Amino acid sequence: MKLTLVPVVALLAAVWIGWQCQQPKNRENRTMNRLESFKSEIGFQTLSEKTQPYQPILLTATSLAGLGMVSLADWTPLSNIVYQMDDNCVIRIWDLEHDSVTATLSLIVSSAGQEAARQALLSIASNTSSPSIPFIKGPDDLGDLAIEYPEDDELQDIVWTHGNYCARVGIEDGDHETALRLARDLEKCLAGYGVSDLTTHLIRIDSVDLKSASVKVSEPFEIAANVSAPDINRIKMECVSLQGRLEIQDLSDRSATVLPIQKGSDVLVVRAFDTLTLLCASRRIELKITDQ
């Protein structure tokens, strides 16, 4: 049987299209298999058995000096950044320097219990394009579960969970002992801030004032969050447009001006967190955006 050129080309095109369509699924499967293998290697599955019930952490130090870490005595603070990562977690990142060596200390605070903190650890570990996850199991005496880069790696990175916290120490061109000393000092600090009950410290967005769930392109509208918190003066608000059809303008502590820029549906996520405890809350608003 003799095939003409056109059917052959069509056949090859169909095969190529089918292969291309399969690639995202294959990549997703490889990512899932890689993560499941990593979880098994570090003993993630048995974590819940070892840490139930758990004691929540409520850290109220907002500066490096406030942590009282002896190992930080010779380090110079460079920056202190805080932002809400998602609906449940807020992160504080300190950059510091000593003898031309730069280090980063990060604290991810979960308002949804220890599970969200553990998922943060997995997200950090799997955030790589390498075929395998570069982290290995860390010291058993560091928090509930620790992972780290191998000791001979140029980048020293240690991540661990402690209750509703996920902590991280990273040093560029640093030695493993220095990173581990900082990590253990930070873990000792966290252990000193345990509380019996976190619920009395949580914040809540009771409602969001909005004239209408239907808005128009190029016509700004105002929103205001009604927040319940131990101290309302410590609350900072953030807004996120999930579909990117809204532009956030003039954001203040508990209100914002929002500009619709494209017709369609969007979800406006209103987030708020306590700048002292980093506990947070969120509320989602579905909006319909119409033409003028």
Image (spheres, helix red, strand yellow):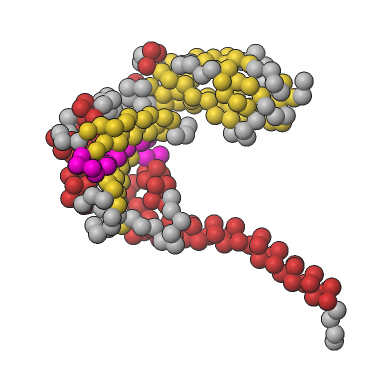
| Residue 250 makes an appearance in the image | yes
**Does residue 52 show up magenta in the picture?**
no
Quadrant in the picture for the C terminus: top right
Number of numbered discs: 0
Does 166 appear above or below 34? above
Q: Left or right: 41 with respect to 204? A: left
* Viewer-proximal residue among 82 and 195: 82
Quadrant in the picture for the N terminus: bottom right
Give the residue at x 69% y 21%.
Answer: 218
Picture quadrant of residue 203: top left
Give the residue at x 41% y 30%.
Answer: 83
* Viewer-proximal residue among 60 and 71: 71
Does 113 appear above or below 152? above
Magenta stretch bounds: 98-117
Picture quadrant of residue 66: top left
Give the residue at x 47% y 32%.
Answer: 87
**Does residue 102 show up magenta in the picture?**
yes
Q: Left or right: 2 with respect to 18? A: right
| Residue 32 locus on image (x, y percent) | 48, 57
Give the residue at x 40% y 39%.
Answer: 116
| Residue 2 locus on image (x, y percent) | 85, 85
Q: Left or right: 152 with respect to 213? A: left
| Residue 135 locus on image (x, y percent) | 33, 55
| Residue 48 locus on image (x, y percent) | 33, 46
* Viewer-proximal residue among 273 and 74: 74
Q: Residue furthest bottom?
A: 1
